[in-house]
Image (cartoon, rainbow, N blue to C red):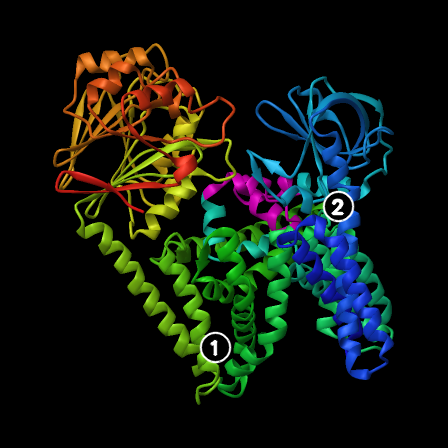
Amino acid sequence: MRVLATFAFSFSAAIFSAVYFLPFSWTPYLSVVLLFSGLLLLLTRQRWTRLFVLMLLGAAVGLGWFYIHDLQTIEKARLVAGTERQVEARVLEYPKSYENYCRLTVRIENGDLPRLNALVYDRSTSSSALEPGDRIVFSAKLSVADRRYNEEIGDYLARDIYLKLNAVSTPKLIQAAGSYERLPVRIHHMLVRHIEEIFQPDSAAFMKSLLLGDKTDLYNREGDYLHLSRAGNMHALAVSGLHISFLVGLIQLVFGKQRFASVLTIVLVWCFVLITGASPSAVRAGVMQSLLLLAPILYRENDPPTTLAFALGLILLHNPRAAASVSLQLSFAAMAGILCFGSALYNSFVSFMPAGRMRRLLNGVAAAAASSLAVLPFTVPLTAVHFGYVSLVSPVSGVLCFFAISLCFCLGYLACLFSLVFLPFGLLLARIAALLGQYILWVSGLLSSLSNAVVYLESAWFLFWLCGVYLLFLLARFLPLRRLEKLLLPGVLSILVMMLLSNVERLHYEQEDGFFSALDVGQGQCLCVFDEDLTVVIDCGNQMSLSNAGDLAGRFLISRGRRSVDTLILTHLDSDHVNGVTMLMEMIPVKRIVIPAGMDDGSGCLQAIAAKAELLNTEFVRLSEDSELRLKNSSLRVFAPLSQEDMNDSGLFVDVSYDGYDILVSGDASQEMERAFLMHALPDPIELLVIGHHGSRFSSSEDLLRSTGADTAIISVGYNTYGHPDEQTLERLASNHYNVYRTDLDGTITFHIEGGHGKKES
């Protein structure tokens, strides 16, 4: 019986239950109940009870430790949240500078405040010069770190960060750090700078992600990030067992496999874990590799389930809230899949291979294919829950990219090393590694661009499909088929059903007269017009949200069978109307973009949109006069700006007409501009009005509400600090007898328009 594995898994399972299911107040009582139940069973002295005793004791310790940890961290943070205090803290990492603020990770060292890790947001730029280990003092407003934009998040808690400090005074240095203080962080920073020096800018972002797990710059390269995610290759950019196995292989290639070399390898592995930030996946991999290397030294056999359970238990012992980390869940799910299915899949593939040299050549392909498929049973549900999609090309991507990822990783570190000794040779290795990186990005882009490469689970039908896939594989397990046929048969059937569902969804939107949707993108706006197979999008942006409006819009369109956007109309260039455009263009082709002529780039988004349009050969139109866009069953009248004095007032008005059913979109126009519009081009009677400026009191005038004759209104709004929608606006709508729908309350709102009538879909 695996004593350590049983105890550690029970300990971890209890913590996961506490994080996701159990009320916090229940955990100490359940811990006591489980503890006494285990002790009572222990007193029976029966051999058959040992397993249950271990499980009960492990769960009791897990719940008890979770309760104690939360009392010492989260509960203490909540006690001081909402206050303004003088803070003394030690800087833990190098500051990150943004356009108008600087962010620091610190450890609070006040005697009157809990000694917790916190994020500091400093509006001044002076703190950007601070270094890890520096001791600072400043005044700050304190808030808990488990909420952002009024949404509960576990990411910061999983990273051991419990408070957010908004600095109200400039942080002052009171004690400089020593030269060797926070040494792993300093080495990490030096490696980042060194990688930037020896790799070209177009390769540095990928190489920093691969070698160090630093994806900061990769997030800004939306195309690369999207392609890697959709192709299932993002796992290669999170420091994990894959990277550490590459590192171990490289070290053993140099030093051999003797006992001394194994001890040296363990030391170097943990140095690598520390300088890459000691993420949960890196720590897990470090523990597993260390135990694997120690086993023969101590004359013990390595037991993978025990090693996996022990590694998970160690991570959760340090921070039980790490259970909420998506990367930790995916990392352990992948390892569990490989342990459960990897060997059987590999043997299945090998049994069909020819003998001789060809078999030896194909062994690597078989191993890569087996690993890529083995991780899917446990990682696919997690990906579906956390990210809302399933990549169907990830197994193919794993086979095509596995060798390149391993070579790129090893050559990247060798390039860093040799460039310090003999720069020309180091630069040569860097160039080869960069070429391999470009190959990985090319394969990812090629596969992710395939039709149905990714299934976005926006529709309930696709959730049923995903459950059906598991049912098919389970049924195939009991059919009298050969091992490989038990994989191929349900796999092929699943793909065929998915293609059928995709076509059913597409035909639903193509064969009806039309649909108009206001997407729930938070505080922003994104409207979609469907007319058979033609698609028009009006605006695409948001703010104060954890999601990108372009990503949300792309998922919505693709999941409804759309393969391109015919026209994207941007009413004006405020960021909450346009900052998702570049991501949308990466996710789905956009044929034409229409913006108001003469508008300044106040949000800073126009330059990026224009550059992306040029790169993707998208037509770019600056509208200076009224225009009409004819579709199949509908038309759009786009009214040119009537003013150039203000960004909100120099935007476009759009009238969408479906055979007598009219929808008016006014962007963020003020009440004065609404009146000017009514005098310029009083539209036909309107049935549906998209309320301007997210319900601001400065829009939606009495004149507009009465003149349009509409009886239905949509407010596109989310969490914000502006007070949208304003009570005055809501009162005006009520007094004019409007039926009001709000995206913050109703989610995405879709009207099916047929025969001149519109009906809201449930």
**Does 389 appear in magenta?**
no
Q: Residues within 10 Å of mark 1 (few under 14, many from 20)?
A: few
Residue corresponding to mark 2 = 70
The segment highlighted magenta reads 195-222
Q: Is residue 272 visible?
A: no
Assess whether mark 1 and mark 2 are in contact (beta carbons under 8 angstroms): no
Q: Quadrant of residue 236?
A: bottom right
- The residue depicted at 29 percent of the width and 49 percent of the height is 562
Name above or below for residue 702 compared with residue 762.
above
Secondary element type, mark 2: helix
Q: Is residue 220 visible?
A: yes
**Is 439 on the left or on the right of 450, as rendered?**
right
Secondary element type, mark 1: helix
Residue corresponding to mark 1 = 474
- The residue depicted at 23 percent of the width and 15 percent of the height is 677
- Which residue type does callout 2 highlight? Asp
**Is 650 on the left or on the right of 69, as rendered?**
left
**Is 340 on the left or on the right of 285, as rendered?**
left
For the image shown, how many numbered marks are present on the structure? 2
Q: Residues within 10 Å of mark 2 (few under 14, many from 20)?
A: some
Nearer to us in this view, 632 or 601: 632
